[in-house]
Structures are given as structure tokens and as C-alpha cells.
Image (cartoon, rainbow, N blue to C red):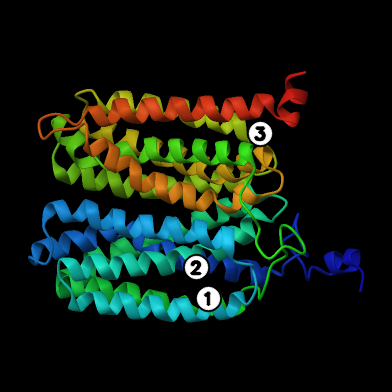
Amino acid sequence: MSQEADQDSGAHVVHEAVGPALTGLEAAGALGVGVNSLLVLGVIPVLLGALVDEHRLTDPDIGLAVMVEVMAMGITTALAGALLKPMRLKLIGIVLTIMLAVVDLATIQTSFAGVFAMRGLAGAIEGVLLWITVAMISRTETPERWAGVFFVTQTLAQLLLSIALGVWIMPASGANGGFIAIAVCAVIGLPAAIIGPSRLADLNPGEAIAGPPPFRGWIALVGTFVFVAGGGAVAAYLQPLAEQAGLDAGVARTALSVSLAAQVAGSSVATALAGRIRWFHVFLFTTAGSLAVWWLFGQHIPAWLFIGANAVAGFVGLLLSPFLVPMTIEADPSRRAAMQSGAAQLIGGAMGPLLASRIVSDQNVHGALWLGAAMLLAGLAIVAWLHVTSRHGTAALA
């Protein structure tokens, strides 16, 4: 049967710029594996906070434990993208999903150093699972659309899990109940690995290894890192920022939930706009929105405005995220850099709070706002240079 006939029949609904089209089930499976890998990131502060309450971690350990897991995830995503061929994906997904559930369960037996070890191992497993999703998205004709679908699904799943943990599971069973819950979620996600694609096309046919990105691809990854790190530097200090504005912790928790809901809206809008708007315009809009919100965070504002500002921050943050991939593809049409975009985002998300921790104090956390703004503007300058100097950007300017 010809390719045109396949498309007319609806058998192939996800058109790949690199390689053959995927069926809807295969695309859903590839996205589901990634959702499974990132599910814990939406609830890890709650889980680690419960470990502190049970005297199994200390307060300073929380930030370090988060960094260990996220950095492990980012590093293994990067290594998988550089070294692995996209073959035997079903087997990899099934085995690693089971291993992830085992590690999540093993965490319930640990304290202090054992928690760091288990979460680092979990991050390494999650990173390879995320690679499967990133590999699929980076090969599609409209990567921003599929990245948007991924972010919508991921954020919804995190929101639902956070509600379940906060309202039912952890009040009754504590931290162990939370880790059992994410282990169960990992097993529930096993069908995604089963229905996902067995393999994807090589970015460089005939090569055993995809190879590193070219120079402009590395610059795009630096831009991604800087943008995400800037947002992470501010997001990590949500509650202290609320307190410095004269608000209580309950307002910060409400703002976080509202922000998650707004993130769903932002990624949904990004999905709808995919292929209809230039990625650079999205970068300009989201940078302006973020800077306006962060200016408000530095003022003494009422609770309703603080919560509303967080809704705007969540919306523009997830509106931007899916467009990071087409930005890297414009800079590096070989798509090698796009394969590393997820890793750059994860490492940026880990490093932003770490950098902010070096310039804030218990009395004043507004330094995080200045750091975030500086990094956001630096990131915009980087991607603007890439856009203006690219062949497509030059043609658009002409």
C-alpha cells in the first residue's frame, strides 16, 4: 500500500519528518512513557517534605535530593540521546518501567543516604524513559504540537496525583503511602511502553551513534538551559516570596495549585497554536509576561493578585515549553540538538534553584527575582541571535 493510501486510511496519523509515520497508538505509547517518567516531579516536594516530618531527611536535604534526581534524569536523557540507537524501545520501556516501580517501592525502606541513592537511581531510569518520548517528538513534522500534547497530559497527571496524595493517601499513610502510590502509577503506565513504537528512524542513517550537535545546536541548548534555569530560580522560592509579600503559606499552596491548572491551559494553547505561530513570537510574549509577574512578586500585593500572578506565570511557562523544540530544530536542522532538549531543560531546572540558593538569605529572597530576570533576558538574547542569523530568520527579516 502506498504512503498516500496509508494516510488516507487514517492508519498513520503522526507524520514524521524523519522516518515513517506512526500510528495513533504508537504515538500515545511514546508520550505515555514520558508522562510516567516525569510524574514524580509534580509531587516530589510533598513526598520529601513528609520524609522530613518523619525525621528521615532534614530540611536542607530536600533541595539536594531534588537536584540528585533531576540531574540524574537530565544526564541519562542526554547520554541516551547521544549514544543509543532508537531500537528495541518496547523492551527498554517495559523493563525500565518495572525497575522504576521497584525503586519507588524500595524508597519506603530508606532514610537519609538511602533516600539519595534511591532517588538518584530513579532519576537515571526516568531519564532513559524520557528519551523515548523526546526521540519521538523531535522527529515529527510539528514537534511543538506533540510537545504541547505531552505537557498537557503530564501536567494533568501531576495535578491529579498531587490532589490524591494531599487529600487521601498521605494523610492516612504518610511518606510511604506516597511512594507506594507513585510505584502503582508506574505499573499503571506499563501499557504505554507495550503499545509504543518498537523503533524510530535514525537521524543519521548508517551511523551507530547519532553524534553531538553542531555549534549552533549547542548554542540552542545553552539558550534552553538559561531560559529554564531562570524560571526555576524563581519558582523554587514561591513560598518565601509569598511570605515576604506579607502572605501566609496557605496562599502559596493555593497559588501553586492554580499555577498547575494554568499550566494545563498554557500547554493546551501551545498545542492549538502549533504550526500557526512563529516560535520566536512565543519567546517574546512569555518573556514579557514572566518579567511582569516577577516584578509583582517583588511588591507587597494582596493574596488575590499573588495567586493571579502565579496563574499567569504557569500559563506562559507551559506556553513556551513546547516551542523550545522547534527553536532547536531551526538552529540545528539535523535534529541532534532537539534530541538533547529534554536534558537541557531538566538540567536547567535543577541548576536554577541551586544558583538562586547562593544569592538569597532567610531575610530576603528577592535576589532570586533578579537572577531569574537576568537569565531570562540572557536566554532571549541567545535565541534572538540564533533566529536572526538563521537562513529562515534572515529570510523573514528580508
Question: Are circles 2 and 1 on residues that touch, CB within 8 Å?
Answer: yes
Q: Is residue 113 left or right of residue 220?
A: left
Q: What is the three-letter code of the residue carrying label 1? A: Gly
**Residue shown at 23%/48% (left/top)?**
253
Question: Are circles 1 and 3 on residues that touch, CB within 8 Å?
Answer: no
Q: Of residues 303 and 41, which is closer to you in this image?
A: 41
**Residue shown at 16%/71% (left/top)?**
174
Q: What secondary structure is found at the residue carrying circle 3? A: loop
Q: What is the three-letter code of the residue carrying label 2? A: Leu
Residue at the top extreme, as displayed: 398
Sequence-wise, which precedes: disc 2 or disc 1?
1
Q: Which residue is mark 2?
A: 129
Q: Which residue is mark 3?
A: 278
Q: Position of residue 318 (x, y in %)?
A: 47, 44
Q: Position of residue 341 (x, y in %)?
A: 54, 49
Q: Position of residue 178 (x, y in %)?
A: 25, 71
In which quadrant will I find the C terminus? top right
Q: What secondary structure is found at the residue carrying circle 1? A: helix
Q: Which mark is residue 93?
A: 1
